[in-house]
């Protein structure tokens, strides 16, 4: 086990972020693969602060150290530095066996199989959208702006370590959700942010003060926006921590890095926003009848029209059907209302870096148009996937939802290909012409699933390899994949894809 080494501190007199020091990332250091985008140049760009080098003692490898300050020489700064600087790296984690994957998925739908996936490989880049505008995330975006972090937080929570009493305590704290009743929620929030709540039990001093520092910063930001009264009901403590860290660093990447460290996410497991931004992102949907719907929540599960401003509710699974099938998903300006307001945000560069080197690309289960496609439409994603010869696996959903009513398996393929090709975007110069087989080579389909698997059409698209995976009926969730069966199928595909076990008759698993 190797600890980070804290560099010498020199306190400047800026009462906000005094220091943001990142060491150069050496080739031999595990984090060089994890955070290739964090270097001295990025640090100075993101924080507009002074930077300097430092090296780890021992074998000469260098580590990424974040040093920050809420005020000169404050206890919060010292606690933050101590917690990050004493984080240990399991060097065996750099040698985890199993293929590397890049996974496009929804924030919650794939969470049920993450634990089983970790047993097969931790070398997974989880790409998630940052355009959610519902629930606790919507309230943060409404008052403080910025990208939605709910799906990122949800996946980070599932990847968090449970290897010690403290790790479990941190996971329980950051996974806690406040009461649906505003008064009770606010009372508990104040107990948590003041450090008096039972949830802090078994969280040691350095970690406690690090987490509290960003919860306090989140609270201070809310107070600065007092005209837009913040509603704590159903709020997620992990979302509040993420928001506080993102605003403090002015970097979503840095917030994810911090969360990963305090919750001991495996070194080779990346959680990547599809788009790195500090701005609010609005998802738009164009229906085949020409109608435009604004906002992810309105597309997938709209709230009742009489819902109060700032009110958070559970997802409405019984939403009425859309008036017309979805033609495409696109991004629009935050105040936009129609197709003239389409914008083209830049994809996270780390997503592209991962796409050119992973052993498999997986389109995971999740809402097709509001969870999967938002990560596929940015420029560069389709180009990077099309040139790869690795297995490209589509995991078909087990059931229909409001977005996909009446669709077949081949219709899912068409939608994904249209998103990657940016077929209907307002700028024809940005469109691609790749065939479905350039993006999808294997399909995993659920036994007994609702969505018809039209093999003849799929074969005509060049998708000849379809594997049926076992499912189980859950009382609350309905029909879902058996986690072990799904991961076994992924293991089979990635292992046999380039071998004699994969031929025109399918996979031998």
Image (cartoon, helix red, strand yellow):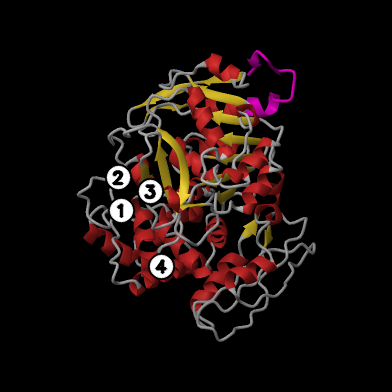
- Give the residue pinned by disc 3: 295
Q: What is the C-alpha distance between the residues marked 4 and 3?
A: 25 Å
Q: What is the C-alpha distance between the residues marked 1 and 3?
A: 20 Å
Q: Secondary structure at mark 4?
A: helix
Give the magenta range.
491-509
Residue at x 69% of width, y 25% of height: 497
Crowd rating for badge 3 (residues with CA inside 10 Å; few <14, some 14–19, many 20+): many
Name the quarter where the C terminus is drawn.
top right
Which x, y percent locates residue 16?
51, 79
- Give the residue pinned by disc 4: 218
For discs 3 and 2, the disc positioned in front in the rendered view = 3
Q: Secondary structure at mark 1?
A: loop
Left or right: where does residue 89 sit relative to residue 200? right
Q: What is the C-alpha distance between the residues marked 2 and 1?
A: 9 Å
For discs 1 and 3, the disc positioned in front in the rendered view = 3
Vertical arrangement, residue 509 with respect to residue 192, above or below: above
């Amino acid at each position: 086990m190797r600890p980070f080494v804290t560099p010498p501190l020199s306190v400047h007199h800026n009462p906000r972020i005094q220091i943001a020091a990142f060491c150069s990332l050496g080739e031999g250091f595990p984090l060089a693969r994890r955070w290739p985008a964090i270097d001295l140049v990025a640090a100075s760009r993101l924080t507009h602060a002074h930077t300097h080098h430092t090296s780890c003692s021992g074998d000469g490898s260098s580590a990424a150290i974040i040093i920050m300050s809420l005020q000169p020489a404050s206890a919060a700064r010292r606690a933050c530095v101590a917690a990050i600087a004493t984080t240990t790296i399991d060097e065996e984690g750099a040698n985890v066996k199993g293929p590397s994957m890049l996974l496009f998925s929804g924030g919650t739908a794939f969470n049920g199989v993450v634990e089983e996936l970790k047993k097969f490989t931790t070398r997974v880049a989880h790409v998630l959208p940052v355009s959610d505008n519902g629930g606790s995330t919507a309230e943060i975006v409404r008052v403080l702006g910025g990208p939605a972090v709910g799906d990122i937080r949800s996946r980070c929570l599932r990847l968090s370590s449970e290897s010690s009493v403290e790790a479990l305590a941190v996971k329980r704290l950051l996974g806690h959700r406040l009461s649906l009743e505003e008064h009770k929620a606010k009372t508990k929030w104040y107990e948590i942010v003041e450090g008096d709540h039972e949830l802090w039990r078994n969280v040691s001093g350095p970690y406690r003060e690090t987490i509290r520092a960003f919860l306090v910063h989140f609270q201070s930001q809310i107070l600065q926006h007092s005209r837009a009264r913040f509603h704590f009901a159903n709020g997620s403590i992990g979302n509040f921590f993420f928001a506080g860290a993102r605003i403090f660093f002015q970097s979503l990447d840095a917030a994810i890095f911090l969360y990963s460290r305090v919750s001991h996410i495996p070194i080779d497991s990346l959680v990547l926003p599809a788009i790195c931004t500090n701005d609010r992102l609005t998802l738009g949907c164009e229906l085949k009848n020409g109608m435009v719907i604004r906002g992810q929540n309105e597309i997938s599960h709209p709230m009742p029209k009489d819902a109060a401003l700032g009110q958070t509710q559970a997802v409405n699974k019984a939403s009425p059907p859309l008036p017309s099938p979805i033609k495409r998903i696109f991004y629009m300006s935050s105040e936009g209302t129609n197709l003239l307001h389409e914008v083209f945000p830049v994809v996270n560069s780390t997503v592209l870096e991962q796409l050119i080197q992973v052993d498999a690309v997986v389109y995971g289960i999740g809402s097709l148009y509001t969870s999967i496609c938002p990560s596929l439409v940015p420029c560069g994603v389709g180009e990077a996937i099309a040139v790869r010869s690795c297995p490209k696996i589509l995991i078909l959903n087990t059931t229909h939802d409001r977005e996909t009513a009446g669709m077949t398996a081949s219709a899912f393929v068409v939608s994904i290909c249209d998103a990657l090709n940016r077929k209907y975007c307002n700028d024809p110069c940005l469109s691609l012409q790749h065939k479905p087989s350039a993006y999808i080579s294997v399909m995993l389909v659920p036994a007994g699933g609702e969505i018809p698997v039209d093999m003849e059409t799929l074969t005509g698209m060049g998708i000849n390899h379809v594997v049926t995976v076992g499912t189980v009926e859950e009382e609350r969730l309905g029909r879902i994949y058996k986690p072990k069966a799904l991961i076994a199928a992924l293991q089979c595909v990635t292992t046999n894809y380039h071998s004699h076990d994969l031929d025109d008759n399918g996979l031998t698993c």
